[in-house]
Structures are given as C-alpha cells and as structure tokens.
Image (cartoon, rainbow, N blue to C red):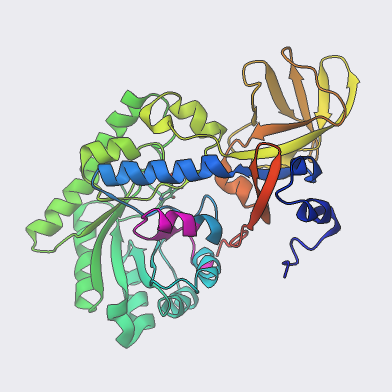
Amino acid sequence: MLSPHLDQPRYHAVLEQLGRPGSRELLATPALECDLDRLDANIAAMSTLASAGGVQLRPHLKSHKSAFVARRQLRAGASGLAFAKLSEAEAVMAHLDDDDERISVLLTSPLVGVELTTRARALARNCNLAVVVDAVAGVDELASAFGTQGSSLTVLCDVDVGLGRTGVVGVDHARRVVERILSQGLHFGGVQGYAGHVQHVKGRDERRAMTVATSERLAQVINALEADGVTVELRTGGGTGTFGIDVELGVLNELQCGSYVFMDRQYRDALGDDDEGRFDQSLFLATTVISANHQGHVTTDAGLKSMATDAGAPSVWSHEATATYGFFGDEQGLLAGTGSTWARGDRLRLVPPHCDPTVNLYDVIWLVRDDVVLDYFEVVARGCSQ
Ligand SMILES: Cc1ncc(COP(=O)(O)O)c(C=O)c1O
C-alpha cells in the first residue's frame, strides 16, 4: 500500500510508469533524484576503503535518513549505523525491524533529560545501543533511566577534538566522565572524536595538518585512560572529508562517514581531485524551466524552499563551467550562462549545495538510471530532529 506521502495526484503518473523508458520526464519537479548505480558504487567504494584500511565503517544516517540506504550499507559490511538524533534512530529502526540481526546503533549527540533517556531504553530493546556522553550528570541520567538494564547499554565518552560543539574538554574531564560510567555499572565502550570543522577544509595538506592536531587530542585522552588501566575499545569519528587521512593516522578504528553516499556541491568544491573526492555525485535536484522570456536568463521551479541554502547556491550539473544558478525567490531559481540555451519546459539537474539538510526537505527520493525512474525510497526520518 502506498504511504500517504506518495498517494497524491502529483505522483500517480510516474508511479504507474516506474521502470519504463522516459518515466523521468513524468516526475513532478522540483524532486530529488538518486542515481542508483552511483549510489551503490559509492557504498561499495567506502566499504572497500574501510576494510582495506583496517577500520570499521558505521555510516552516519544524518545524510540519507532512510531505511533503504541503511540496508544497502549494512549488506555492504557496515559495522552498524550512526544517528545524530534519537527520533531519527527510532524512525529508521522501525523499518529495519524485520531484519534478522540485531543492529548496532550509535547516537552521536549526547542525550539530555528523562524523556530522551527513557526512550533510549525502549530503543535498546531492539538493537545494540551505544550512546555518547560528555558530562558526569549525563552519565547519572543514563544510569537512572536504564536501572538494572544498564549493562545492555554501551556508553562512549564524547571528546571535543577542536570543534567545540560537544565532548569533554581535556584529559581530566574525560577521566571524570569515564570513572562515573564505570562506577555506575554501565559498559564503557570507548571514545568518539568528531572533527566537523575539518571536513570541508579545501586542500588535502591543510586538511591533513588539522586532522593531525584533532587526532592528537583524541590520542591524548585514549593514552591517559589506557594508562589508568581502562580499555578503550572503540575509537569512532571521521567523515567524508577526512576518512583517508583518518585511516593513515590510525587513531580511529571506526569511521562515521555520511555524505559520501550522495555527495554535494560543497564537498565537491572542497575535495576536488583529492583522494577523499573520489565519490560520484549521486543526488540531484531535478528542476524545470518555467519561464524563458529574457535574454541571458531563464527561470526554473526550484527556489529557496527546495534546497538547504547554508552552503550557498547549487551548481548546474553538466554545465558547471558555463552556467550559474541564482536564488530567484522562495519558489524560483535563475539560470544564466553562456554555454547553453534553455527553453520553457526543459528539465535539468542541480547539484544540491549541502545534501543532508536538503534531503530533510523531501518525503521521497526517486531512484533513477538514465531516463528511467526505477523506484523510490522514503526519507523515513525526515524532520526527526528530537
Ligand atoms: C558526529 C558526526 N559524525 C559523522 C558525520 C558525517 O560526516 P560527513 O557527512 O561529512 O561524512 C557527521 C556530520 O555532520 C557528524 O556530525
């Protein structure tokens, strides 16, 4: 049965023609298209790189928020799944319930308050749950919510490696948090150190130098805990911009990359031909020219509301050097360029500026190959930010 998101007049024509040549023309735009072959190639490539580098891969679901892509990542050998928010994990795990294996789930943002920690205990009944903490009070909240079930939960110490967003600051702080995890009878699983401020730094040398510094901060904490006799089994972090460097440096033994499945303009600009930039653009924003009455520009149906704009404007796929997109209001975009002339009704593809928050604007992503819409998947954790 179709979900209410799809059972709408604007989707009926394309749903009737799934798999047929030319069906892409029937997609109501703006729409997110995902090239299935590129998606699968990206999933396979990251999985191969991680195993060749001797690290586990726990893809971050903040990028795709879907059970469909998660299943493909798990089948390709992912050690588990990472989620930013508890409600994201609840939504996706409800769709992965039928899978045989208990999935390892990591929540990468600290939980605060009784409501969240109680829900986390409910989630832990159906998966192997790990959470991060960065405060002694956070450990106490987890211990009181989990009570006698405390041993079913793995707790990681989140370490601030320079981003300043979450994480304990310095070795002494880490020691206090880890001591409390142990004294509360919870299972201490290791550390998380996510260098979000490094992922989009342009130029591999610069990114590498910054990653050396962030890894050093994490290594100091690991060494101090191990000197105290505490085993630090899991060392998780990393992203699409630094995974190759993280493997080289060897401090992390698990990578949490997310954006590599889709890529976006921001990452393409930052990574260029670097090793980390090897992933194909698989996510596109399909748009249609709705007005072409001026010399020098046409107007399309994708404006501010159809993509996240924190990273600036999208690029125009296949016309990156000759055409530019400019925001033209909430619902329209302006296309200008020398290399191509567009006419009313033409369809083209934009490369979303930033994939994660753009995906969060859509209920459905259409799986395509050439001019065919093969299928679709739902962004089941769309809007799950709690
Ligand atoms: C904690 C954490 N881990 C991993 C990632 C994945 O990073 P990327 O999408 O750059 O691969 C993010 C992204 O913001 C994150 O916040």
* Residue at the image point whose x is 66% and y is 21% from the top: 319
Relative to 10, 232 lies left or right: left
Please name whichever residue, 277 or 334, is drawn nearer the observer in this view of the structure. 277
Q: Quadrant of residue 196?
A: top left
Q: Quadrant of residue 346?
A: top right
Relative to 255, 39 lies left or right: right
Q: Is residue 121 above or below residue 16?
A: below
Quadrant of the drawing holding the N terminus: bottom right
What is the count of numbered marks?
0
Q: Is residue 109 magenta?
A: no
* Residue at the image point whose x is 30% and y is 55% from the top: 192
Please name whichever residue, 138 or 351, is drawn nearer the observer in this view of the structure. 351
Q: Position of residue 334 (x, y in %)?
A: 78, 27
Q: Quadrant of residue 180?
A: bottom left
Please name whichever residue, 150 or 20, is drawn nearer the observer in this view of the structure. 20
Q: Is residue 73 visible?
A: yes
- Outermost residue, right direction? 293
